[in-house]
Image: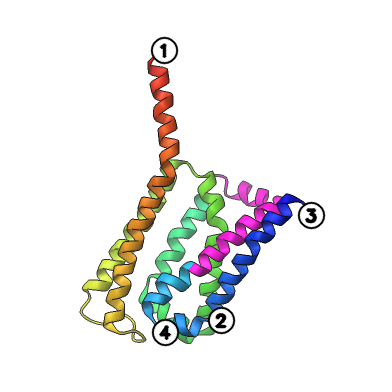
Amino acid sequence: MSAATRGARQLALPAAVLVAAALLLRGSLEASMALHMALQLPMIAIGGALAGLAAARSAPRLALAIARWDAHGLAGLVWLLLSSAYWMVPRALEQSLTMALAEAGKFASLFLLGFLLPGALARAAAVIQLFFLGNFCAMMAITGMLYQDMPQRLCNAYSLDDQVVTGVGLVVASIGIAAAWCVWQLPALAGQIAAAGGDGTR
């Protein structure tokens, strides 16, 4: 067995576990708005991301085809905004509780998001990442503040207190994602500063 195959299997297993857990535990996870949005949805997306990384190792032709189709990461990042915006709408979240088709669409759309996102981020320039992730984090934070400030329930299936907790979670998550991206970009920024300093001393 090659190293690439072993690496793909090591990624595929946790991907399958995450998606299976999100599906099998849906009754418990979807009983709370906070768990539904802050745990189940990310579980599906992270499972998709691990599956995408596994596919890149085990199926290089597929990875190459996706890279050609999404050369600058725009398609994956646009899908990030579209899918996340849709599943932040309370009505969409509520429909997934009662409609099998909506639930299937939730799993499919978020798994696809995760599958595409690692490659999209790898191919996108820092300024493109900043634009899309900045919009994503801003949208998440604004949605979280609206959830906290609304005096009435936005989802009939969830209590007002649960809605407020979810809003706090969304704001915290938006800050965490923004901070994580900044930390991730620090090595590249330091390299650019060092290169600029080296050019200036010549």
- Whole-angstrom CA distance, mark 2 to mark 4, is 13 Å
Q: Which residue is pictured at 34% across the width and 84% down the height?
A: 158
Q: Quadrant of residue 137?
A: bottom left
Q: Secondary structure at mark 4?
A: loop
Q: Are marks 1 and 4 in contact (CB under 8 Å)?
A: no
Q: Amino acid at mark 2?
A: Leu
| Chain-order first, disc 1 or disc 4 | 4
Q: Is 67 above or below relative to 44?
A: above
The residue wearing badge 1 is 202
Q: Which residues are magenta?
A: 43-72
Residue linked to disc 2: 24
Q: Amino acid at mark 3?
A: Met
Vertical arrangement, residue 115 with respect to residue 123, above or below: below
Residue 126 in sight = yes
Mark 2 lies on a secondary structure that is helix
Crowdedness of circle 3 by 10 Å Cα count: few (<14), some, many (20+)? Answer: few
What residue is shown with label 4? 31
Q: Residues within 10 Å of mark 1 (few under 14, many from 20)?
A: few
Residue at the spot of label 3: 1
Tags 4 and 3 touching, CB below 8 Å: no
Q: Nearer the viewer, mark 3 or mark 1?
A: 3
Q: Is the C terminus in the top left, top right, bottom left or bottom right quadrant?
A: top left
In this rendering, the label closer to the viewer, 4 or 3 = 3
Q: Would you say the magenta stretch is mainly helix, strand or loop?
A: helix
Looking at the image, tell me whether mark 3 or mark 1 is earlier in sequence order. Answer: 3
| Kind of residue sitting beneath label 4 | Ala
Q: Nearer the viewer, mark 3 or mark 2?
A: 3
Q: Based on the displayed image, in which of its 4 quarters is residue 135 positioned?
A: bottom left
